[in-house]
Amino acid sequence: MKLPGNLQQIMQQAQKMQESMQQEIEKIKVDASVGGGAVTIQMDGKKNLLDLTIDSEVAGDVEMLRDLILSAFREAVNKVDEEIQKKIGSQMGGMGLPPGLF
């Protein structure tokens, strides 16, 4: 289906922006550390777990270790979400959209 000229240009621009945003998200890498560094998680922009480091001092306490891992994972997810929002905000800033829309 052929769209009117201006609308077609807008759609092409939106597609390019989406592709650019996906590339930026793929570059994101965050570290989240909890328990004074007892557990550290590295996560990418797609929220894939890249690395998990556990201090040997907490390895024996299974319940505490579980809580620390879950806490580090949540923190890493939040950091990824914050980075994505920053990137979306910087790309969408020039479009004149209301703040907080994305």
Image (tube, rainbow, N blue to C red):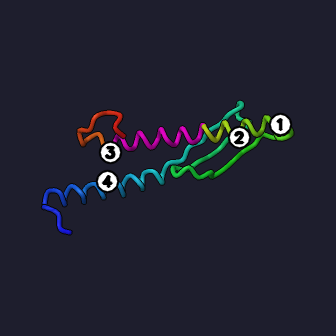
Q: What is the magenta range?
A: 75-91
Disc 4 secondary structure class: helix
Distance between mark 4 and mark 1 Cα atoms: 47 Å
Most prominent secondary structure in the magenta stretch? helix
Q: Amino acid at mark 3?
A: Gln
Distance between mark 2 and mark 3 Cα atoms: 33 Å
The residue mark sitting in front, 2 or 3, is 2
Image point (30%, 58%), residue name: 15
Magenta span includes 83: yes
Is label 3 in contact with label 4 (beta carbons under 8 Å)? yes
Q: Earlier in the sequence, mark 2 or mark 1?
A: 1
Quadrant position of residue 88: top left
Q: Which mark is residue 69?
A: 2
Q: Which mark is residue 17?
A: 4
Pointer 3 residue: 91
Give above or below for 25 relative to 71: below
Q: Position of residue 35 (x, y in %)?
A: 72, 31
Disc 3 secondary structure class: helix
Magenta span includes 21: no
Is label 2 in contact with label 3 (beta carbons under 8 Å)? no
Quadrant position of residue 89: top left
Q: Earlier in the sequence, mark 1 or mark 3?
A: 1
Q: Amino acid at mark 1?
A: Glu
Q: Which mark is residue 57?
A: 1
Q: Earlier in the sequence, mark 3 or mark 4?
A: 4
Disc 2 secondary structure class: helix
Q: Is residue 39 left or right of residue 3?
A: right
